[in-house]
Image (cartoon, grey):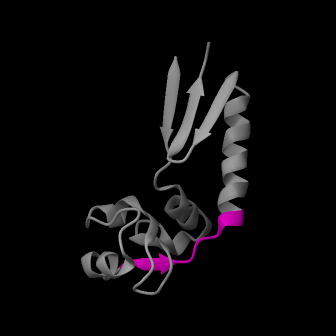
């Protein structure tokens, strides 16, 4: 059996977890300049067509009310490691990949 966890909005979800005022709002994680790109967007921002790797100027145009936050890689790594640790308690093989976590149980 293979289980796939979609964690594509992980960074934005962490920001909403850590900052209650962001919950239910459009959150974009990335640089603030127009030359930056979107690292990830919350599901609320995705409704406006905002997605990863989109130029920030386009994301701002599509979702002007979005809250843009700078990435906090140390925090994301901390929570990601906790999630991987929990998964490893239940599965003999956990394979993190760039867009999610793949678990294979044999």
Q: Residue sitting at 53 percent across and 65 percent down?
A: 16
Q: Please, which residue is most extreme toward the bottom here?
A: 33
Q: Could you tell me which residue is drawn at 72 percent across and 47 percent down?
A: 81
Left or right of 52 in this view: 29: right
Q: Position of residue 24 (x, y in %)?
A: 41, 66
Question: Is residue 62 depicted above or below 7 in this figure?
Answer: below
Asked which quadrant contains residue 47, the reply is: bottom left
Pick the quarter of the image with the C terminus.
top right
Q: Which residues are magenta?
A: 66-74
Residue drawn where x is 49% and y is 72% of the image: 22
Q: Is residue 21 magenta?
A: no
In which quarter of the view is residue 101 placed?
top right
Q: Residue 64 in the image: state x and y as whole percent.
A: 31, 82
Residue 66: image x %, image y %? Answer: 38, 77
**Going by the image, does 45 lie left or right of 19?**
left
Q: Residue at coordinates 52% horizontally, 43% vertically from top-left?
A: 100
Q: 43 above or below 54?
A: above
Image coordinates of residue 42 in percent, x first then y, are: 42, 62
Is 85 positioned to the left or the right of 17 in the image?
Answer: right
């Amino acid at each position: 059996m293979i289980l796939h966890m979609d964690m594509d909005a992980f960074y934005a979800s962490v920001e909403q977890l850590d900052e209650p005022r962001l919950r239910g709002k459009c959150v974009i994680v990335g640089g603030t300049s127009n030359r930056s790109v979107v690292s990830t967007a919350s599901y609320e921002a995705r409704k406006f067509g905002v997605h990863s790797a989109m130029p920030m100027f386009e994301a701002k145009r599509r979702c002007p009310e979005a809250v843009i936050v700078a990435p906090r890689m140390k925090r994301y790594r901390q929570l990601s490691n906790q999630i991987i640790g929990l998964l490893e308690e239940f599965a003999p093989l956990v394979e993190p990949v760039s867009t999610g976590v793949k678990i294979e149980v044999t």
